[in-house]
Amino acid sequence: MTPGADLVRLSGVTRRYAADRPAVLDCLSFTLAAGEYVAIVGESGVGKSTLLNLIAGLERPDAGRIEILGRDLGAMDDDELTLYRRRAMGFVFQAFHVLPYLSVAANVALPLELAGTARADIAARVGAMLDAVGLGAAAARSPRELSGGELQRVAIARALVHRPALLLADEPTGNLDPGTAGQILDLLRAQVRANGGGGVLITHSAAAAASADRIYRLDGRSLAPVAAGAAYSAG
C-alpha cells in the first residue's frame, strides 16, 4: 500500500433511520490516507458508531459513496462485503468479543482460519502476533483466566494478525484503567504502523484521541479537524 494513497473515501454520505427524523449523518465527506491513524470524537448520538459501521460495510448509506482501497462498497452484495471485511479490515471493540470457549491462540487464529491460511503459517503468525502484544506465554490459556487489559490485547492481536489494510476501533479502552488504556493505545498505534495500513479510532476520551495522528470532531454534517494543542472535550 502506497503511503498517502486514499485508503478510505466517503463522498456525500447520508444515513437516516426513519423518514420523519433528521439524518444521523448528512452529506458527509471524509478521506483517510494510507499510513494515517485518526481519532473521531463528538457528543453521544452524533453518529460516531454509525460512521464506523458504514466504513465497515455493516450498514449501507441512504445516499453517497464509500470506497475502501478504491473499491465501491455499494457495488458489493452482502457475501462480497463479508469476504472483503475478513481480508481488508480488523476490528477492536470495547466489549472485546473474545470467545471464552477457545484458547487465546485459537481466538487470535480465527481471521486466518476463515481466510484459509495454511496451518503452518497460522501457527507462526499467531505466535509472532501474541509476542508483539506481550502475550506469548498465554497462548494456551483460557480467556476466563485473563484480566481486562489482557483480553483487549487478545482482541488487538486477533484484529491485526491477518495484516489488514484498515483497523477500526470503537471505544477500545472504555473498560480499562488509565494505565492499561495507555498501553493499549500505544500498542494499537504501533501495530497499525507495523502493518503499513491505516486506522480509525472512535472515542469519548480526550486522552485516547490524543494518541492518534489527527483528531476530528463529528457533528453530523462534517468531520472538522481539531487543531493541535487545542483545548476540547471528546464528548
Image (tube, helix red, strand yellow):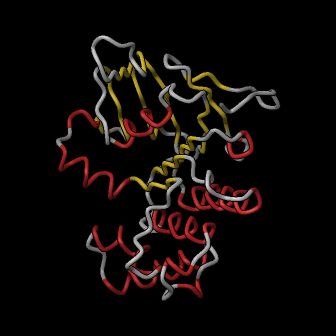
Residue 118, compared with residue 51, is above or below; it is: below
Splitting the image into 4 quarters, where does residue 188 fall?
Answer: bottom right
Residue 175, compared with residue 141, is above or below; it is: above
Percent of width and height locating residue 147: 61, 73
Percent of width and height locating residue 219: 55, 20
Percent of width and height locating residue 3: 55, 46
Residue at (25% x, 55% y) in the render: 83
Quarter of the image with the C terminus is top right
Residue at (30% x, 75% y) in the render: 117
Number of numbered discs visible in the structure rendering: 0
Task: Say whether residue 122 is left or right of residue 32.
Answer: left
Residue at (63% x, 53% y) in the render: 173
Task: Say whether residue 6 is left or right of residue 74.
Answer: right
Q: In terms of depth relative to the viewer, which is nearer, 90 or 107? A: 107
Percent of width and height locating residue 182: 73, 57
Residue at (49% x, 51% y) in the render: 167
